Amino acid sequence: MSILKREFSKLIDVCLEKEVDKVNSDKYRLKYHLMPPIGWLNDPNGLCQFKGEYHVFYQYSPFDANGGLKFWGHYKSKDMIEWEDLGACLYPDTPHDCHGVYSGSAFVENDRVYFYYTGNVKHVGSYDYINNGRGHNTIMVTSEDGINFNDKKVLLENIDYPSNMTCHVRDPKVFKKNDKYFMVLGARDNNHKGCILLYNSDDLEKWNFLNTISTNEKFGYMWECPDLFELKDECSGETKSILCISPQGIEADGYKFNNIYQSGYFLGNMNLENGNFDFGEFIELDRGFDFYAPQTFIDEKGRTILTGWMGLPDIDEEHYTNPTTKNGWLHALTIPRELVLINNKVYQRPIEELRKLRGIYISRELKSTREYNELKGEVYELDIEFNNDIDNLKINLKSDCNISFDKNERTIKLSLGDSGYGRKTRSVTIDRLNRLQIFSDTSSLEIFVNNGEEVFTTRVYSNSNNDKINISGNLEDVKINMYELGEY
Ligand code: FRU
């Protein structure tokens, strides 16, 4: 173990000892979401299933709940329900990653996991961390057990990237197609246009640059956390490429692009021979206030599973706040969601394993009612099916959170009161409302509309003890199933 790693590890233990009781006694600690044990969490990293076990790594700043020096934290699980916390695992302990073990991915082959990440280095005395002044190294580290790592290997340094790039190149995602390996990196070019760099390799170590992929018109100044995968459309049977990015610098446009930064995908066909991608429209993956930097992996059952960061970078008091920082922690990951493609649209469905969390259960069928207010709860799954054309729907929960649907406007709206800590309203337009599946945790909501056609993810910090759920509207032929969700 390097001296630095040993010192970091001691320091984390000291912080844990000092902070962990305060963190764990926070009433907003979540019951079934992954959170940092102390300090700050951002992007999910290195998602994979290896020898049957699921691994989730994440951007972890143990020393400061407001962010800071980044490590990778680690959780593993047999079923994605009961997670074992393995703490900090990749440390910023070499000259090539000394200012942060930034985001990256995992690739599993032949009893080995290959991890790729960005080693961040801020050059001392530099005032320009965009155009120069920053090292952004692509680093590989392998593991035979998914827990212990071999030595870090630097694969690409600044000089290896195309010369028209700024020093914002990061977040490698590696995958295999037709016996060849590919890597995508998110980047910002010298004209401050967001783009992807595509590489290929025969041996997972030596990477050849293939192409810069971007839209004709500039779409934001930086594309973070790229992901490229395929889904077979359940309607047409056609296989499509999904290029997922988290772009920065997009202006709000009506109900679209209302967060500081976005996360979404372009649907198209990726030609991996010449590196060309035919861009379709950019579609946001989430309509809520807290969603960024999602990553997918394919599990041993062949499912494409996505997990996102239930938060956003660069959020200050002007946007909204999170009261958990004063208790020594901030942010969480979303529940894992299985992705399916239906009629050229990516649907997100809570993974079926989450049913294991279900406890006490209530089922109701409403034939012709205007209001239903017998339910209450804090940590639950509320599943509502609308068999008739629902109108004027209003659901009030978590004291001052409202979900509404107006048939004429065809708009689903999420509004938060004081418990939003500055988060106010987000909306999306849909054709018809068939189903709402609401996953509520102590301080979060994930609302799946029409079997995952749209999703709203948000943090919410209810202050009062009001856990009543009130549903009103022309409730004709409405089926309600509510499950208390247990702690893992
Ligand atoms: C996205 C991101 C990545 C970077 C990481 C650093 O939230 O900015 O681009 O690798 O976070 O924590």
Image (spheres, rainbow, N blue to C red):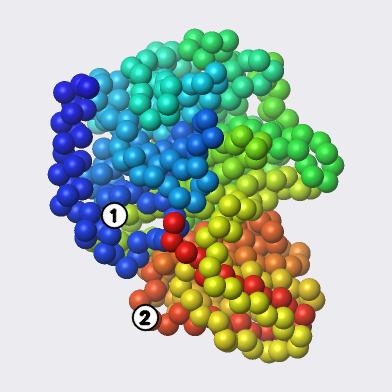
Q: Is residue 334 visible?
A: yes
Q: Which secondary structure, mark 2?
A: loop
Which image quadrant for residue 103?
top left
Q: Is 53 on the left or on the right of 2, as rendered? A: right
Which image quadrant for residue 146?
top left
Image quarter for ligand 1: top left
Q: Position of residue 359 (x, y in %)?
A: 53, 68
> In the rendered view, would you say 32 is above or below 12?
below
Determine the residue positioned at 56% across, 13% down. Answer: 201
Q: Is residue 193 visible?
A: no
Q: Position of residue 347 (x, y in %)?
A: 68, 51
Determine the residue positioned at 56% across, 44% down. Answer: 306
Q: Which secondary structure, mark 1?
A: strand
**What is the spatial separation of the Cα atoms under label 2 and label 1, in whole angstroms?**
21 Å
Mark 2, residue position: 464
Q: Position of residue 419 (x, y in %)?
A: 40, 73
Determine the residue positioned at 64% across, 33% down. Answer: 229
Mark 1, residue position: 329
Task: Using the image, tell me which numbered label, if any, was put on residue 466.
Answer: none
Which corner quadrant holds the N terminus?
top left
